Amino acid sequence: MINCLIVDDEPIARQGMLEYIDQIEFLHAMAVCKNAIEASTALQSHHIDLVFLDIQMPKITGIDFLKNLNNPPLVIFTTAFPEYAIEGYELNVMDYLLKPISFERFFKAVLKVQAYLSLRLRHEVTQVENYFFIKSNQKIEKVLIADILYVEALSNYVILYTKNKKHIVYMSFKGMESQLPDGLFIKIHKSYIVAVNAIQTIDNNEVILADHILPISKSYRAQVMQRIERNLFKRL
């Protein structure tokens, strides 16, 4: 599932983009914004993979907004002005859609994004080291990524639960999150990250592992279910 953000100051354009997204099963509209200021807040509140970004907007243009993002998601420009195309591609946007946007052209653009994200995920999973070192109890220990069940936040520490041991590590939860490959782990709560392979059951708002039951918070439930549905067996 590709989580999308729509940013456009025109209500009709926003609605049209929403209708297109709703017709494609691998797209999900996480938020809709009418200017760059609202979009900045949305990027902080949601995990966004793809932004459909208008260029000519009041106060801050789409190009200036994109230039000021430190770690931008993928972007498709949606605009009525062809003259910004070269500058757009210099900013490494995935595509440049001219209004009025046909569904056929929209679909071609998002297929390109889907292919790119799939390739990047496979690369990240294959290239990641299968271990890292932590400092715990005055010792430096090697932890195999395949052995990790979940991570729990605890003030300025994290508790790292593996198949055979529990490690208490002095580091931030965000710091530990950055060490774990996205393709193998998923955040289910502001205080829990779980290895996808360790999940045995999802029951309402709980994730059940072999010997642990963890809560899924409301703010992360949709993201968790989207990740699980990628591997859901579907009867044809």
Image (cartoon, helix red, strand yellow):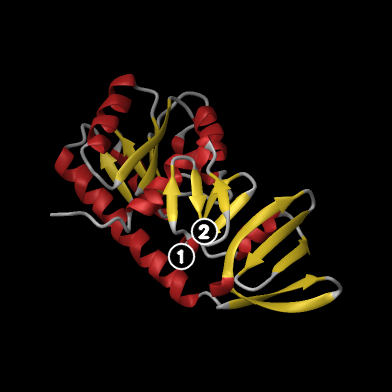
Identify the amino acid type marked 2: Leu
Identify the amino acid type marked 1: Asn
Element on which disc 2 rests: loop
In the rendered image of this protein, does residue 90 appear above or below residue 126?
above
Q: Nearer the viewer, residue 89 or 151?
A: 151
Q: Is residue 93 visible?
A: no
The quarter of the picture where residue 159 lies is bottom right
| Callout count | 2
Residue behind mark 2: 209
Q: Residue 197 bears which disc, if any?
A: 1
Percent x, y of residue 206: 50, 45
Element on which disc 1 rests: helix
The quarter of the picture where residue 175 lies is bottom right
Percent x, y of residue 234: 21, 54
Percent x, y of residue 46: 51, 39
The quarter of the picture where residue 116 lies is bottom left
Relative side of 18 to 146, left or right: left
Identified at 78% across, 48% down, the residue is: 155
Label 1 environment density (alpha carbons within 10 Å; few <14, some 14–19, many ≥20): few
